Amino acid sequence: MERQKRIDQEHFGSAQQQRMDELKRRIVGIFKERDITFFDCFVNIYDPLNSKASIIKISEFKKRIRQLNLPLTVQDHRLLRRIADPKQIGKVDIKKFCSFFETADLRQRRLNKILDKVSTAFFLQGFNMRRAFSLFDADGDGEISAKEFRQGMAALNLHLRYDEIDDLMHLCDRSGDGSVSYDEFISKMDSNIKRRTGQVMEKVEEAFFDKLGVSMEYNRESIFEIMKDYDFDQDGTIDIKDLPKVIKKLGIMNPEPHIGTILKAGGCGKSDKRIDYTDFSVNLEQEVQKRRKQSSSVYERQLQKISSILKVKDISFFEFFVMLDVNQTSSISRLEFKTGIQ
């Protein structure tokens, strides 16, 4: 009798493991197709300096999982909850759960996204690697501890989760001794960030011109009028060194990393000492308008594509948004929108 019971338990365990493996295979396939992972569900939950923040209630877990709009059955969701809360205590270690469904290539994709954020931050703030290392090495001993690495990343305000910060730490810590030397930091971070900065640069430039366009549109003074205030010799030109002050008066802080791009858009070069602000302001406004039209045409094509798909499926936009609102909150998160569109 006991022997039969043990055999039944082993058979049940084996069958359940097979179902788990099959569910994992299907979910990983969906993630690769949609370019997402379970980590995307739990943005803003993590405290970058507190690893214990990865424990959440099962009710919160279910709500966030629904945002992915995965094509799963009721049984699949039950099995998913069993994987998340194996002891059925009503709590989920989201780092452990997310890692279970993350293959090596999905992890590399996620790591690339993290490097995108870091390289963008370094580019916007004009950091070189030595300055960045100094920011992290708080006690100046030439080594970055795990605590210093987390604090340094948190100081960049990138909203990285602690697991993402730890991933970057492990990426840099080639020796595996739990700290990062200057040579390790430079050899790993610099090579990765340089490779990805080129890819990020175009997006950063586009975002900057969007912000510049909005600032120029809603500022009480035009860029011509602001530049004219710096024409101290009243000869129709201003000193090139005053250009950052002009951009700041538009409400854009830290414009220094973008000065080269702004000069080029205005028809000037870095070697110029004076700027003819009449021509410059006209050229800059034309460049902003040109980029706006390009962005608008891209968005219009995307909306037309969505509209055509909904028309074929005989679904109204209202019905479509109701379908996206999987948690029935009358609002749609970015993740719900992304997965719904896909």
Image: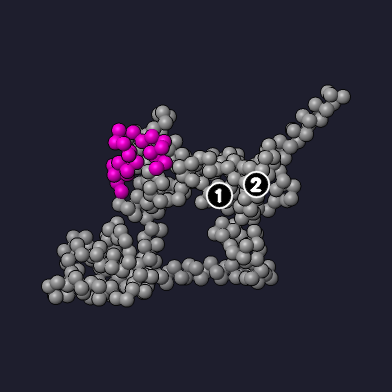
Residue 224 position within the rendered picture, expressed as x and y whole percent measured from the top left: 25, 75
* Secondary structure category for the residue under label 2: helix
Residue 295 within the magenta-colored segment of the rendering? no
Would you name the residue on which mark 1 appears? 42
Q: Residue at x 53, y 43 (%)?
A: 53
Neighbours of disc 2 within 10 Å: few (<14), some (14-19), many (20+): some
Would you name the residue on which mark 2 appears? 58
Q: Can residue 160 be spotted in the picture?
A: yes
Left or right side of 104 for 235: left
* Secondary structure category for the residue under label 1: helix
Q: Residue at x 29, y 56 (%)?
A: 257
Position of the C terminus by quadrant:
bottom right
Residue type, mark 2 in image: Ile
Front-most of 173 and 300? 173
Q: Which residues are magenta?
A: 127-151
Residue 153 position within the rendered picture, expressed as x and y whole percent measured from the top left: 40, 45
Q: Is residue 219 above or below residue 244?
A: below
Location of residue 24 by image quarter: top right
Q: Residue at x 66, y 43 (%)?
A: 90
Residue 206 position within the rendered picture, expressed as x and y whole percent measured from the top left: 39, 62
Position of the N terminus by quadrant:
top right
Residue extending furthest left? 233
Front-most of 235 and 30? 235
Neighbours of disc 1 within 10 Å: few (<14), some (14-19), many (20+): some
Q: Residue at x 35, y 46 (%)?
A: 194
Q: Can residue 196 be spotted in the picture?
A: no
Contact between marks 1 and 2 (CB within 8 A): the answer is no
